[in-house]
Amino acid sequence: MAKQLTYRPLDNIGINGLNTQANPASLDSTWLTKADNIVIRESGRISARKGLRQNILKTSAKIGSMVEHEYRSGNTNYTKVMASVGSSIYTIDFGTPDSAFTSAHTVSNSTSDWQFVNFNHKLYGFQNGVSPVEYDSGTWSNPSSKPSGVTTFDPSCGMGYYGRLWVGGLTENNDTLYYSDTLLGTTWSGGLSGYIDLKTVWGADEIVAIAPFYGQLVIFGKSNIAIYNNPHDLSNLALTEVIRGIGCVSRDSVQAIGDDLVFLSSTGLRSLSRTTELDKVPLSDYSINIKDSLIRHISQSTNVKSTYVESEGVYVMSFVDKNITYVFDMKYFTPNKAPRVTIWKFDSDRHPSSLAYTESKGFLIGQQEGSIATYQDYYDKDYSGSSVYTSNSYTSSFATNWIDLGGSVVASLLKKLTMVIEGGSGSMLGLKWYKDFSPTPSKTTHISLNPITTGAIGLWGDPSALYGDVKYTPIFGLKEYNTSLTGSAKHLKLEMDIEINGFVASLQDATLLHKQGKIR
């Protein structure tokens, strides 16, 4: 008697994101073993990331750091974006993309690796081995004030909060935290300025980053974390907790996200969580699903930039020297209480060298080739001047874990894969499959995506134009695609590559059809 077909819905395929830590044979179809250039939508569907659209003509070197600065003129507040390139700090005029770098301020012996801090309508910059800089009402300066007893005032990190500036990581005294006089970011001696010596707090360590956290002062060392209460009232400042053995390896990995303070340690991405039930601040491991991979990258480079993209609900962390960007989706936590993870990769020198989230421009990506890009559309667009853009496609790739076809000794005859895909007009999907833990895949099956189109072509030509991507852009809907599978297997792994060339593509559903075969 002929065997009946078995229909196996791949329910919630990839909804938990990437997992390179667990044994792939023990994972279910909600996990992915590869997740390149994708995002997981709120609906749980696998979708392509957006593109990087350059907004200005590139300069001669990478964009090392960026900041949005709010300043006051008269009774009105204004904002501008600053960016550092080489030894200079520029104001960025997005209205003139061919000559966007204006008002340069050059700092001798500096690089572009600044930490910018907004404080009391002024902007301050800190960098290892370099004296601080201040921007006030359109003028840059190099303040000469320094704490008493300090020969060379060159803090590597800073924070503007609780009514004063806080800095640390001085070359000659890297385990002492200094704070300025009240509301006076350039007054470091006299008044209500002072310091906290951490030698007796955590022993031998150095200050890497400083952050506010729900009325507390958090000081990150490389191997320890010190937490103080009442930083707004120095007369009652008190050490509340020292977390030993866990520190921060990258200043620019620290981000406040809701009730979390996220940072990169030597053992992965961690967070300090605020709770009302516990006196102590609990520590969480957010990279548990990619732990070994992340630790390997940390051992190779700690040149990391990060930001929290509020509009997308994701923490983005880029290893600048390796062109690998991890995206932690903070809207959804997996069953083991970690945010789901995907990876972004970029061709050429488009990959991030700095990241920032701004109120005026949204998510900004400073690139290695010297341009500033926004996260939009579904092309990686390069700007070459005179309003000329070159659109470059990119590939979104993902792979499932090993799918158990239901028989420990009985192989299944592979018949068909049915997929429901939204969008992707004109894209080519490449499908290959692996059988029974073999590293050798099948030949790639190519499927042309051609969904039904409704609506008129954008009236303004460019979908990013005002109203163009809302009212006049065509809608590319859902379509079912069927492809034959060959061979027999007890375990099956699927891998898909989709070329993204202007339109988003999203996998909505997948069903595997197979039939019982021979015992083997």
Image (cartoon, rainbow, N blue to C red):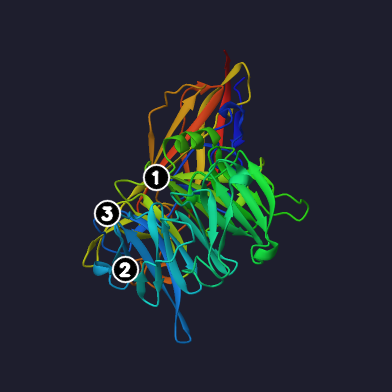
Please tell me whether mark 2 sits on a helix, a strand or a loop. loop
> What residue is disc 3 on?
61
Q: Gap in Å between the C-alphas at discs 1 and 3?
A: 20 Å
Image spot of residue 266 (x, y percent): 53, 38
Would residue 129 be visible to someone looking at this image? yes
Identify which amino acid the numbered label 1 is placed on.
Lys
Q: Which residue is mark 1?
A: 345
- The residue mark sitting in front, 1 or 3, is 3
Q: Quadrant of residue 519?
A: top right
Which three-letter amino acid code belongs to the residue tagged 2? Gly
Looking at the image, can residue 40 be seen?
Answer: no
Image position of 463 (left or right of 513) = left
Q: Of 392 and 159, which appears nearest the observer?
A: 159
Q: CA distance from mark 3 to mark 2?
A: 32 Å
Bin the neighbour count of mark 1 within 10 Å (Cα to Cα): few under 14, some 14-19, many 20 and up: some
Task: Specify the farthest residue to the left.
Answer: 386
Total tally of numbered discs in the picture: 3
Q: Earlier in the sequence, mark 3 or mark 2?
A: 3
Residue at the (34%, 60%) spot, across then down:
84
Position in image of residue 270 (x %, y %): 59, 45
| Foreground pick, 367 / 144 | 144
Which mark is first along the chain, 3 or 1? Answer: 3
Nearer the observer: mark 3 or 2; the answer is 3
Q: Is residue 364 above or below residue 306?
A: below
Q: Is 375 situated above or below 281? A: below
Residue farthest to the right? Answer: 277
Residue nearest the viewer, comparing 342 with 269:
269
